[in-house]
Image: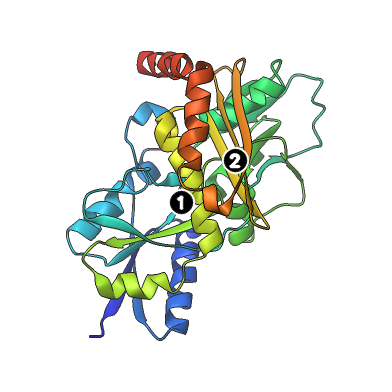
Amino acid sequence: MSKTIRIGTRDSELALWQAKKVQSQLEVHNYKTVLVPVKSTGDIILDKPLYELGITGIFTKTLDIAMLNGDVDIAVHSMKDVPTALPIGIVQAAVLERAATEDILVYKTIPDYTQQCTIATGSLRRQAQWLHRYPHHNTTDIRGNVNTRLQKLVESDWTGAIFAKAGLKRINVLPENYEVLDWMTPAPAQGAMLIVAMEEDQYSLTACAKLNHKETALCTHIEREFLRILEGGCTAPIGALATISGDEVHFKGVLFSLDGKTKIEVSHIVSHQNAIGFGTDCALEILDNGGRALMKEIKSQINKK
C-alpha cells in the first residue's frame, strides 16, 4: 500500500515550519506528503488570555476534528500545546528530537530589574515564576503568534516579553537583545514537536515511527505524566523538565500559586530502568506537600475570573 500522507498543521509561520520539517523528514524516507493548513480557535480569538477561554487543547482541537473527519492523516504540534489526554482514536505517532527548552526575555533596552518593570506573557507559568523572582514587577497578557507578539513588544512601553527560545530560532526571528531565563522551569515538553495519527492508520504510524527520537520521547513522557497527575494544562503555573545524563534521568518539577508567592518544587534522579512512573511519583510528591490545596485554590481563582 502507498498513499500521500496529508499533514495537518496550524497556519502560523512557526506551525508551518514545524510541519515542513516533518514533511522533509518523511520524504527522506520516500513517503509522499502534502500539507493541509487550518486555523485553530486559539489563533482566531486573540483578545482574551488563554486560561479565560476555558478550552483544553485550544490549539489542537481543530486538527483533531480534521483527523477524525478523515481530512488529514497526521497532525504536527508544538508538544507543549497538546493536552495530556488525546481524543479517542488519536495516538502519539512520534516525537522529534528536542530543540532548546529555555524561556527567554526579549527586551528593547537592557532591564534594570531593581526598578519597576512590566513584563508581557500569555502564560500563567511564566507569570508566576517571574513574580516569584521579581515581586515588585508587573506582568501583562500578550497573545498572538510569534511575529505578532514581537511586534506588540516593539510598539509597547513594556520592559520585555517572554518567549520560548526554540520557536524564535526555528523561524529565524531570534533577536540579539534577549536574555536566557535559565532560572525559569519550562513548560512540560517545551521545545519538542509531536506527531499524532489515527490509531488504526498503520501506514502513517509506520512512517512516523521512523522520525521518533527515543530520548526526547522518554523525557517528554515523564514531563507530561507529571502534568497530567497535577491536572494542569493551560490553567495552572506548572513547569517540568527531564533530561538524560548517561544512564540517569534528571527531573525537576514546580507548581506555583498564580501570584508567584507560593512555590512547591521536586527534584530527583533515577536510572533509565526506574523511569516508568517517575513523572507520577514526582507529581504525587508535589500534591502531598501542599499541592492539592494549592491546585484547588488556583482553580477557584481562575473560575472567578
Whether residues under marks 2 and 1 lie with C-beta atoms below 8 angstroms apart, the answer is: no
At horizontal 66% and vertical 27% (from top left) the residue drawn is: 130
Of all residues shown, which one is farthest toward the left?
69
How many numbered dots are placed on residues in this image?
2
Q: Which residue is mark 2?
A: 186
Residue 252 spot, x, y in % from top left: 62, 37
Mark linked to residue 93: none
Residue 263 spot, x, y in % from top left: 61, 20
Q: Residues within 10 Å of mark 2 (few under 14, many from 20)?
A: many
At horizontal 51% and vertical 54% (from top left) the residue drawn is: 218
Mark linked to residue 79: 1
Q: Residues within 10 Å of mark 1 (few under 14, many from 20)?
A: many
At horizontal 52% and vertical 42% (from top left) the residue drawn is: 188
At horizontal 27% and vertical 53% (from top left) the residue drawn is: 64
39 lies above or below 48: below
Q: Separation of disc 2 and disc 1 at Cα?
A: 12 Å
Residue 4 versus residue 43: which sits nearer the camera? 4
Residue type pointed to by label 1? Met
Label 1: element kind: helix
Q: Is residue 219 left or right of residue 198?
A: right
Q: Is residue 296 left or right of residue 129?
A: left
Label 2: element kind: loop
The picture quadrant where one finds residue 57 is: top left
Quarter in which the N terminus is drawn: bottom left
Of all residues shown, which one is farthest toward the front?
273
Whichever of callouts 2 and 1 sits on the residue coming sooner in the sequence is 1
172 lies above or below 184: below
Quarter in which the C terminus is drawn: top left
